[in-house]
Image (tube, rainbow, N blue to C red):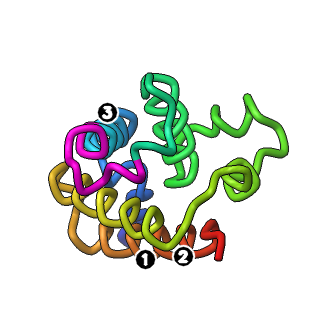
Amino acid sequence: MSATVTEVRPASPYEAVGGRDGVRLFVDRFYDLMASDPRYAALRALHAPDLTPMRASLAGFLSAWLGGPRDWFDERPGACIMSAHARIQINAETARQWTEVMAQALADSAVDPELATRMNEAFARMAEGMTRR
C-alpha cells in the first residue's frame, strides 16, 4: 500500500500578505503616512490632492504584481508601471521617501518580515529605475 503525498504549494505573496484586504491595508497605510508625515512632503507633492484614485490603482497594481487578480493589467492592456511614471519628476530624494514610507507601511501592516524584505528590495530597484538623474 502506497501513501499519497499531498504537495503543499507555498502561498503566493498575494496570499501571504492577506489577499485583497491585506494589500489594501498596506496601501492605505502607505498613503496615510505619505499624506500626514512631513518627512514625505516632497513625495506627497508629486500626487494629486485627492489620493482616492491612487489608492485604488496602487492596490490593483500590487495585487497583480504579488500574484493576485490581474484586473489592473486587464483594464490597462500593455501598461507599464515604469512608463506610467516617466512624466513624473522623480528624483533621488522622492525615490528614497517612497521606499522608506513603503517599508514603514509594510512593517505597520504586519507583513511577514522575510516577504517585506523581498518586496522592499524590489521596490528599491523600481524606485532607482524611475529616478531622473
Judging depth in this view, the residue of 39 and 79 nearest the camera is: 39
User: Which residue sits at x=44%, y=26%?
Assistant: 49
Cα–Cα gap, marks 3 and 1: 23 Å
Judging depth in this view, the residue of 20 and 92 nearest the camera is: 92
Dot 2 falls on a residue whose secondary structure is: helix
Going by the numbered disc 1, the residue's amino acid type is Glu
| Residue 49 appears in the rendering | yes
Q: Which residue is mark 1?
A: 121
Q: Quadrant of residue 103?
A: bottom left
Q: Compare marks 3 and 1 and give the one earlier in the sequence.
A: 3
**Mark 1, other Cα within 10 Å: few <14 / some 14–19 / many ≥20:** some
Can you give x and y, in whole percent of width and height, for residue 94 in the image?
45, 62
Can you give x and y, in whole percent of width and height, for residue 83 in the image?
76, 54
Residue range in magenta is 32-43
Q: Compare marks 2 and 3 and give the one earlier in the sequence.
A: 3
Number of the front mark, 3 or 1: 1
Cα–Cα gap, marks 2 and 3: 25 Å
Cα–Cα gap, marks 2 and 1: 6 Å
